[in-house]
Amino acid sequence: MAVRILLIEDDRELGRALRTALTTEGHAVVSAASLSEARALLANHSAIQPNNTHTTQPFDLVLLDLGLPDGDGYSFLEVARKASHIPVIVISARPEEESKIKLLDAGADDYLVKPFSIGELLARIRVALRYRGNLAQPATLLYQRDGLHVDLIKREILLNGLPVKLTPTEYELLARLVRTAGQAVSHRQLLTDVWGPEYLEHTHYTRLYIGQLRAKIEANPADPHFILTETGVGYRMLAAD
């Protein structure tokens, strides 16, 4: 299972850069630009049904900015700690030792001062997950099955040895499905991870682009072999060989 990260950052440019870097590494990222949005996402991904299952796949880690438009990230940390033991890494422009101590004492797993390198962030994420005992399976970055070859590191897609040309959005959608091949991905997750949380109401996007993808990689798009429909949920990429 890919690591699911809740990124709470109101700086659009930084948020986009972090999202791209983390997604490239195989992580599934859900973004929030405010405390209210973050709280709603955390509650939705932590709610337990009577049969003791989650309503949606829970987050594995939170990246938390402090200066948010509707309050301070410190209050979110308090909520997160009451709800679960999910690792929380604070990313902030505040270098003061007092701020670091306050957040770490309140339950943050780590504190990164902006600006920081992506390499350092990824290392801190690995440490936080390891410390919490999370051995989440790495995402699939190389997919091969029945003539379809997808290399997300090289951004290479071949079908029976011939290159497949995809639009940028088609590629991101296929990459999202490949990273969690063998697992169902909901329409909401696809919309959030590929287009962004502001597109959650545009459910026709997934149907349209899945249709376009199938037309390019399936021998019979009407009876797909690689991208399967999970009725009432979303889609699932057939597991690799």
Image (cartoon, helix red, strand yellow):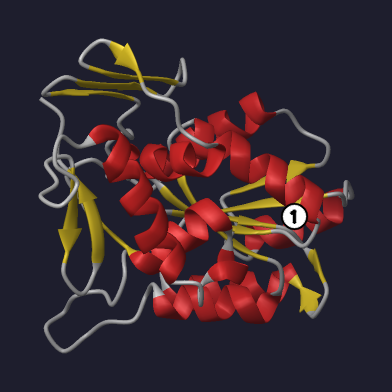
Q: Secondary structure at mark 1?
A: helix
Residue 147 placement, left or right of 140: left
Residue positioned 56% across, 56% down in the render: 195
Q: Quadrant of the C terminus?
A: top left
Name of the residue lying farthest toward the bottom: 50
Residue 208 vs 225, above or below: the answer is below
Q: To which quarter of the image does residue 121 belong?
A: top right
Q: Along the line of sight, which residue is nearer the eye, 101 or 70?
A: 70
Is residue 163 among what the camera can see?
A: yes
Residue 171 vs 207, above or below: the answer is above
Residue 192 position, x and y percent, is 50, 61
Q: Around disc 1, counting alpha carbons within 10 Å, would you say few (fewer than 14), some (14 to 19), or many (20 or more)?
A: few
Is residue 85 among what the camera can see?
A: no
Disc count in the image? 1
Residue 200 position, x and y percent, is 51, 72
Q: Along the line of sight, which residue is nearer the eye, 224 or 22?
A: 224
Residue positioned 51% across, 71% down in the render: 81
Q: To which quarter of the image does residue 45 belong?
A: bottom left
Name of the residue lying farthest toward the top: 161
Q: Quadrant of the N terminus?
A: top left
Q: Along the line of sight, which residue is nearer the eye, 42 or 76?
A: 42
Q: To which quarter of the image does residue 140 belong?
A: top left
Residue 134 position, x and y percent, is 32, 45
Residue positioned 80% across, 48% down in the render: 13
Residue 27 position, x and y percent, is 45, 41
Residue 180 vs 82, above or below: the answer is above
- Going by the numbered disc 1, the residue's amino acid type is Ile
Residue picked out by circle 1: 101
Residue 160 placement, left or right of 155: left
Residue positioned 42% across, 45% down in the render: 173
